[in-house]
Amino acid sequence: MSTLIACAHGTRDEDGQATILKVVEDIRGALPQHDVRDAYVDVHGPYCKEVVADVEPCDGTSAVVVPLLLAGGYHVYHDIAEAVKGREDVAAASALGPDPRLVDIVMDRIHEAHIPETTTLILAAAGSSDPRSTADTEAAAEMLRARWSGPVRIGYAAGIHPTVADAVADARANGEDGEVAVASFLLAPGFFQKRLGEAGADYVTAPLAPHPRLVEIVLDRYRDAGGS
């Protein structure tokens, strides 16, 4: 059986760390006979490259690194790619998104926040200068537009424009009727989630994790990359 390495970004926020570890525990519960390990690309260890190095080489696929990241970008295409470089027995899976099941979770969080159906939504992602990450977020927004009655905009917590605060202000300035809600497209609590609460919206939803649908996506990415 292949080791599943669940690789998240990393955060100094204790609630965020606990949330990621809860996701990892949920994955272990879904794969009770497998070795499931957590790893991170930034902020704190165990770092992905170190966790990969600790996996015993074997014929076939010894491990699959599954990014606990909602979109592709630098961390997927550089950090994780570098961590598995030179290990033909270790595969790197694709990011969790875009995937309609992530939008299912966003919709669950919207309903939990009791947001009226005509409200303008700002889909709030972390933000990345990598155009592949931006494209993944835009694809998620298109999926959300197909599920939501009101307008859907995109805002970013860091790095690129429009910021979440700018997107909220633009929605109000453009006269979009009703209230404005920020729909978090972040995996866990932390600095970026706190920033969403400062954007001036009428509602802010909780981050996506933990959620059973996340585990489903992780398992699919693992198997698609050759995990067994």
Image (spheres, rainbow, N blue to C red):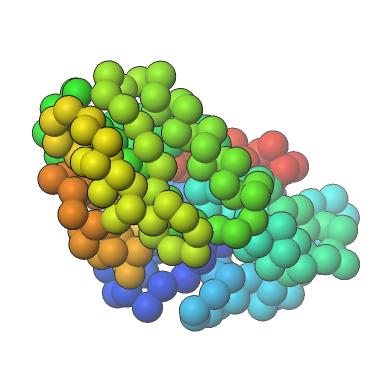
Q: How many marks?
A: 0
Residue 222 at what x, y percent from top left? Answer: 63, 44
Give the answer, above or below, for where 169 lies relative to 111: below
Q: Quadrant of the C terminus?
A: top right
Q: Residue at x 65, y 50 (%)?
A: 131
Q: Residue at x 31, y 22 (%)?
A: 148
Front residue of 58/201: it is 201
Q: Is residue 211 visible?
A: no
Give the answer, above or below, for where 34 lies relative to 41: above
Q: Residue at x 25, y 64 (%)?
A: 194
Residue 133 at what x, y percent from top left? Answer: 59, 49
Q: Is residue 139 visible?
A: yes
Front residue of 161/49: it is 161
Front residue of 58/70: it is 70
Residue 217 at what x, y percent from top left? Answer: 52, 38
Give the answer, above or below, for where 159 lies relative to 72: below
Residue 34 at what x, y percent from top left? Answer: 58, 52
Give the answer, above or below, for where 85 lies relative to 2: below
Name the side, left or right, on which 217 lies relative to 59: left
Q: Quadrant of residue 221?
A: top right
Q: Residue at x 49, y 79 (%)?
A: 43
